[in-house]
Structure formats: C-alpha cells, structure tokens
Image (cartoon, helix red, strand yellow):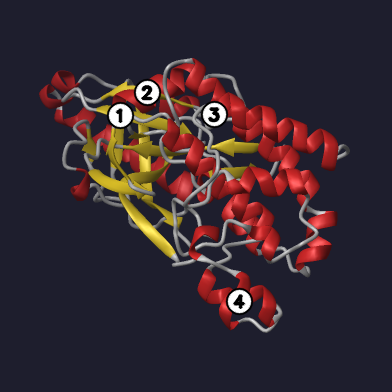
Amino acid sequence: MHDSYSRHAHIPPCFIRAFGQIVKSDRERIEARIKELTGWSNVSHFRILTDTSDWSRIQRGDIIRLGGCDFLVKGNQHETRFGIGDQPKYWVFNALNMETGEQKIIKTVFHEDFYVHIGVFKIHCYRSVEKESYVLNIVRGDDRFMQGYTEMDEKENRVRVIDFIRGKSFFNFICEIEKPHEQYYYEDLPGILHNLMGCIEAIGFLHRHGTCHGDVRNDHIIIDSETGRYRWIDFDLNQHVSDFDVWSIGNIISYAVAKGIASFQQVMHKTDFPAEVRNSLIPEDGSAFFEYRVMNLKKLYPYISDRLSNILLHFTIKPKVFYTDMNDLIDDFKEMLATDFPTG
C-alpha cells in the first residue's frame, strides 16, 4: 500500500474548493503518484471524474473516483473476435488502482440490444449491468470466474471494478497449437476437455442460481497464466432464454475438437481432406448457431470418439435430439471424459 497516497487521497470536495492551496498540493501529490506508477512525463492535465455517464469522454490519464478509491485510466480494453484483430470496447477501461498499483478493468454502463438466430429461433440479447453485478456477487471467491465488485458513481451508475487476469484467451490458446490435428487430438485435446469440464460446470452453477453467463465465447475464457485455471469473464449480456448458454457451449466444444473454426469453405478448399470427405458434407452437418461451421466433425476426423461426436451432433442444424438443460450436457460430457479420455 502506498501510504503517502492513501492518507490524503480523498479530501472532501467542499474542503478543496474552500482552500486553493490544498487543491494545488492535492494535484501535485496525484501527479507524483501517476509518474511513479507509469513513468509518464507529462501528467499535469488529468481530470478527476466522479460521473461516468458519458464514457466516450473518458481519456487516458483521467482518474475515475469510485467509492473512495482512485483509478488511473491507461486506455480502452480490447478484444479479439474470430481473428479479426483487436476491437476496442470504448466503455471498458484498463486502469490502475492508485493506492495499490494493481491493474483493474473498469466497466462503465453501456446499453445495447440485438437479436441472434439459433436455427429458426430469434433471440433478443441485451446488456444488463444489474445482472453482471449479481453474478459478481454469487461467484465471489470462485476462481472459475473473473472477480470484482460493483461501485456506484455519483450519478448512481453501476460501475464494475474487475481484477485483471493475466493469461491467454482460449481462442488464442487453441490457435497457437502447431500440430497436425490427429496428433493434437491424442496429445492435447484430453487435457483441454477436462479443463472445459470445469467451465461447463461453472455455467451450471450460474443456472442453479437463476441466472446465466449470456455471452459464452471462446475469447471469454481466459487461461490464468499463474494457475492454469480456465476462467470465465464478461457477464453483462443477458437473454430470457437459458438455452442460449447451452447452445453457446456447443461452439466452445466444437472449437476445441476442431482445433479452431472448421468452416465449410475452408474444408472445400483444403487438399488435406479427400474428395469423398468434402463431397459427403451436407448443410445438416453445420452448426445451428453458425451455419457456415461444420459441427459434424467426425466426417472430417474419423478418429473422433463416438461419444464426443454424439455430443457435437446435438448442436447441428437439424439434430435428432438437442440439449435443453445444462445438466444433461454435463452428464454426457462427464461420461464421455470418463470413457474416452479417463486420464486427461
């Protein structure tokens, strides 16, 4: 803890306005702390913000003051989607706790809603800060999830303060494995599937508590570099359809088994697959979530176990049977691991 900062960090605004000299000394102290934390040379133009309503105006070098704690904004958080490079999230900020120096993620209030399609179903998705705040409360201390808390700013905006997880996204982790698929299947996939079991059970935990993840994606699992633990992040997306998480988990499993995204287009243009394999593919082999992706992966990789293939077939466009409950998926996944990949 940095005592020289914490001892005087939060002088009441009315006191500061009444005594100009204190304002000056407060700014000098903050400038010194910013330089100490960052090594930046020009830090004299910072602003102390207690209202995050207009997050588009928050800039690098600003200080967000929440619940008696100051956070120095270093920039916007970015995420990678489907290999399209880093996409900025303008309402989410990388920051430093100015007292402890710890890296944090500050999520301000952002309203968004849209529709997605799963087969013939049209599902309304929307962002809910209340839901993410609830999830953060119920998963406190559970290292299968990101950790954080919610603090109100002066305008009663629910700002989430998230612990930064050092690690690699599941999306990037799989992409970077440079092995032929069959070698990957036998050497790497067993351990990956066992780790994913923890992720799937974690989603089941949320469902038992009457909520959901809402945005299950390959880049929303971070593999903690310190512990190797697979950890879920980002809980603010919501739907009124609990099956959305279940169908989304199918995308995660498919991505792991295929060692990436196996699209119809890629398969048709790769000489790795014999002509009879390419010609055997039909639209019904595609994913109900993303129709351009092959979900019936056993056609591409015949050494995939029958039980694992059967799980994947639940997520095709016209499945003979599909999962409507996370518990059913968990039971099938556990049985598949125990039978086909017992050691992990």
Please tell me which of labels 3 and 4 falls first in the chain: 3
Kindly identify the amino acid type of the residue bearing the numbered disc 1: Val
Q: Residue at x 76, y 37 (%)?
A: 336
Q: Position of residue 327 (x, y in %)?
A: 59, 24
Distance, label 2 to label 4, CA atoms, is: 49 Å
Check whether the beta carbons of the residues at disc 3 and disc 4 lie within 8 A of each other.
no
Check whether the beta carbons of the residues at disc 2 and disc 1 lie within 8 A of each other.
yes
Kindly identify which numbered label has been placed on residue 279: 4
Most foreground residue, 24 or 242? 242
Counting other residues with Cα less than 10 Å from the Cα at mark 1, is it few (<14), some (14-19), or many (20 or more)? many
Distance, label 2 to label 1, CA atoms, is: 6 Å
Q: Position of residue 65 (x, y in %)?
A: 29, 30
According to the picture, the residue beneath numbered tag 1 turns out to be 129
Q: Residue at x 49, y 30 (%)?
A: 324
Q: In the image, which is nearer the foreground, mark 1 or mark 3? A: 3
Kindly identify the amino acid type of the residue bearing the numbered disc 3: Ile
Most foreground residue, 128 or 73? 128
Please tell me which of labels 2 and 3 falls first in the chain: 2
According to the picture, the residue beneath numbered tag 3 turns out to be 203
Kindly identify the amino acid type of the residue bearing the numbered disc 2: Ser
Does residue 146 appear left or right of residue 32 in this picture? right
According to the picture, the residue beneath numbered tag 2 turns out to be 133
Q: Position of residue 49 (x, y in %)?
A: 22, 36
Q: In the image, which is nearer the foreground, mark 3 or mark 4? A: 4
Distance, label 3 to label 4, CA atoms, is: 37 Å
Please tell me which of labels 2 and 4 falls first in the chain: 2
